[in-house]
Amino acid sequence: MRMLKRLLQRLDRRSEHWVSDPHFLIKLFLLSLVLRIGLVLLHWQVTLISDMLGYHEAAVSLLQDGVFSVKGRLSASRPPLYSLFIYVIYYLFGTGNIFMVRIIQAIIGAFTALLTFRLTEKVFNRKAAVWAGLIFALYPATWGYCDMVLSETLFTFLLLAGLIYLVDIPQGKMSDALIAGLFFGLATLTRTVLYQFPLFVAVFYLIFSKKRWSQLPNLAIFVITAWFVLVPWMARNERIFGKPIVSTKSGVDFYLYNHSPFKYILYNYSQEGEDVLNGIIPWKLSEVERDSICKDAAISWIKEHPLLWAFKGVRMEWNFFSVEREYTWTLMAGYWGQVHRWIIGLILFLTAPTIYLLMPLFIWGIVYSWGNFERQKNLLLLLFYFLAVTFVFYGFSRHRTPLNPVLAVYAGYALTSSSAIFSDLRRSVFWSKPRAIIAASLLIFFILGWLLEIFIDMGSVLHLGFTFEGWDTISNANQ
């Protein structure tokens, strides 16, 4: 503990220099860019897998036929903006130029580090912003997502840009509400998880704020702008599917972890097909039919198993804040071609456990910054919204990825408050410090989830027979 305290004190003195450095943002951008592009340059060629294929197919379909289709069928299972992003790159640099997609994502990731700095500076102070920007720049999982053809990098950038303006809503300028709504609408067209968030924010203030009527115009502008951005996509779906929907996959997502027996919830995978839906195989239906029947099946299961559903919710919260395993799974599935196990193990060691460093800082930062509620209340609303979605639907570290900059915001604040935190952690005063007790209790809660996850992962690695057999299939195929 003493060594850690001295290390943080030295880093704190160093951060004072960075705060006064007029070129810090340029250095932060270049550091972020070099790390992300460096990973891309390690392998020029990749093989698209899983969700990547759907995004690629939609972009090619737009380029060649002018329609948004996947596997030869008009589709709304994925929102369109990320495929449009790939379409523009293909149009400029050639169809199938995945290398340029990854390079441009690396540039976007570097700009996201600057947005993390700006958001932290606006909510807290410049010193915390220095730490938050560096944490995001150096966080290995953020490099990996820039390297993968997935929507997380673009979505995170749009979400952070919107949050910078959302901080001042509803009492700020109308232009801030307009710009925030625009960015949140675009983010929703990248990942639909934010679809209900503008209404959630508006309802919160209308119920709890004493200034609700004076704040109503800004709230209305935010909600209307965010949803207006979705109108072209919803109108297209109304014409094709007969419903003004944002996605034909929300019911499937709802179903995915709201139908399974206890062991499937515990072991992180689900049971699909005839034995769940009374002989109906949902993947053979149309997108709209499949979405509807999956939603109904999930609701029925929740009514029949309310306690199991509650346990599932807690399990998903643990998964949501779990290790960053997505890049490792991608390598195992053949994204880099044939990869030796020692390389996969090295990547797992470098990327996955970093959440164990970020989460304690985030927890102490969020607890110790509680007195500064006014500037951060909308960040807290966003966190609560994601936690609620995770509890009701499902969640993994990949779904948390866009929130990693927000976690870095609070981690940056914790590093600037390290003296107060260490003072409260002394055994002689700990039990008289409510903030320290709350922070330690939250950390223990997540440690329980991490221990369960390590137990399951070790079973996968050591072939103990209590986890999904697909791990062996994937890893054996890539030796």
Image (tube, rainbow, N blue to C red):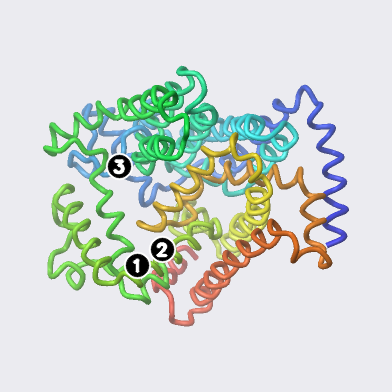
Q: What secondary structure is found at the residue carrying circle 2?
A: helix
- Where residue 191 appears, x then y in whole percent? 38, 40
Lateral position of residue 310 relative to residue 246, left or right: right
Q: Which mark is residue 313?
A: 2
Residue type beneath disc 2:
Gly
- Please tell me whether mark 1 or mark 3 is closer to you in this view: 1
Crowding near pointer 1: few (<14 within 10 Å), some, many (20+)? many
State the residue at coordinates (31%, 44%).
54
Residue type beneath disc 1:
Trp
Q: Are marks 3 and 2 in contact (CB under 8 Å)?
A: no
State the residue at coordinates (34%, 67%).
309
Q: Nearer the viewer, residue 204 or 265?
A: 204
State the residue at coordinates (28%, 69%).
271
Residue designated by label 3: 78
Residue designated by label 1: 309
Task: Give the answer, above or below, for where 45 lies relative to 314.
Answer: above
Assign the N terminus to one quadrant of the image. Answer: bottom right
Crowding near pointer 3: few (<14 within 10 Å), some, many (20+)? many
